[in-house]
Amino acid sequence: MTATSNHWKPAARRLPIIGNFLRVVAILLVATFARGVEQKHVKLLAVGNSFSQNTTHYLKDIVDAGGDKLTFGTISIGGCPLEKHWTNALAFQNGSTDKEALKWKLLVSEKWDFVTIQQQSLMSCQVETFRPFAKQLHDYIKSQVPTAEVLVHETWAYRADDPLFKKDFTQQDMYWQLRNAYETIAAEIGSRVIPVGDAFENARRDSAWGGVFPDPKFDSKKAEFPALPDQTHSLNAGWSWTKDKSGKQVLKFDGHHANTAGEYLGGCVWYELMFGHSVVGNKFHPKEITAADAAILQRIAHQTVGEGLKPAKASP
C-alpha cells in the first residue's frame, strides 16, 4: 500500500498544473469565439507616396489592437505618380542600380497577400493619367507575386478651403472626378478599390462629424502667432505655425495631406478591407483623438467598407 501511495503522489501533484493549463486554454478559446472572428496575419506592400504613408500611419496599431498581425513593406516616393513607379519598376527589371529602382527588390522579398497602387493625388482626377501605367504595374506585380491581390487605393479630395478650388473646380468636383477615375481603372484591371476617398466624403457629410471650412472668423492675412482657426473635425492638416530658417514663426496651410483624424480614418478603412474584421470597438486611437471621435470614425469606416456606403450626388 505504501508503494502504491507513493506511486500516485506525483500524478496527484500534476493534476492542479494540468487543470490550470486547461483553464488558460479555455479562457483563450472563449475570448477568440467572443470576438466572433478569426485572427489573421496579413502581408501588405504599399506602393505609393505620402498619401499611402498617411493611411498606413496607424494601421499597425489598429491591427495589433484587433488581435491580428501585420507584415508591412512600402515602396514610397513623395509626390510619386503611377508613371514614375512604373518607370522605376521597369528600370529594376532591366538591371538598374538606381536607388529608386532598387526599391522594387521588396516585391519579391515576401509572399505578399496584398499590394496596393495609387495615383498622385491631383492627377487622381484625370483618368487618362492612370493609363497604361496602372495596368502595367498590376501585371508586373502579378507576374512576380501571383498569389497577391492588387488593390487600388482611392485617395481623397482636398479640404474645401484649399487654394486649388475655384468657382469652376470645387471640392465636390475633385471628389467625383477621382472617384470615377479610381472605379474606372479598378474595373479595367480587375481590382478592388480601398475606398478611403469615399470614407472622407462620408465623414464630411456625417451629422456627427461634419466640419466647416474655412472658419469665417479667421483671417490668415492678419493672424499673429499662435492664433489658428477652428479646425474641429478637419481630416486634413490645414493651418499650422512653423519656424522658418531664421527662427521666425510662419503660418502655413496644407489642405492636401491627412491630419491625425484623417490618418486614423484611412487606417480603419484599410484594416476593414484587408482583414475583413469590423473596426468598430477597436481599442486603439491616437491620443490626439478622443474616444468619442474615434468611435465616429470607426463607424464611418465600417459603413464605407462593411456596408458599402457611398456618397450620393446632391440634387441640382
Image: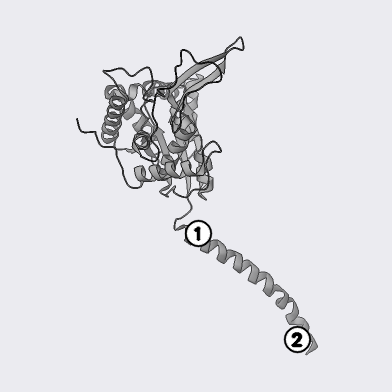
In this rendering, position of residue 280 left or right of residue 309: right
Up the image or down, 202 lies above or below 36; here it is above
In this rendering, position of residue 157 left or right of residue 54: left
Q: Report the disc number at residue 117.
A: none
Compute the Cα span from label 2 to label 1.
43 Å
Residue 290 lies, in percent from the top left, at 51, 41
Which is more toward the observer, 143 or 300?
300
Which residue extends farthest top?
246
Residue 46 lies, in percent from the top left, at 45, 33
Quarter holding residue 181? top left
Q: Report the disc number at residue 4.
A: 2
Q: Residues within 10 Å of mark 1 (few under 14, many from 20)?
A: some
> At numbered mark 1, what does the secondary structure look like: helix, strand or loop?
helix
Residue drawn where x is 60% and y is 64% of the image: 24
Residue 274 lies, in percent from the top left, at 41, 44
Up the image or down, 143 lies above or below 96; here it is below
Residue 204 visible in the displayed image: yes
Residue drawn where x is 56% and y is 17% of the image: 225
Q: Are marks 2 and 1 in contact (CB under 8 Å)?
A: no
Which residue extends farthest front?
217
Is tag 2's residue or tag 1's residue first in the polypeptide sequence? 2
Q: Which residue is mark 1?
A: 32
Residue 241 lies, in percent from the top left, at 54, 19
Which is more toward the observer, 218 or 261?
218
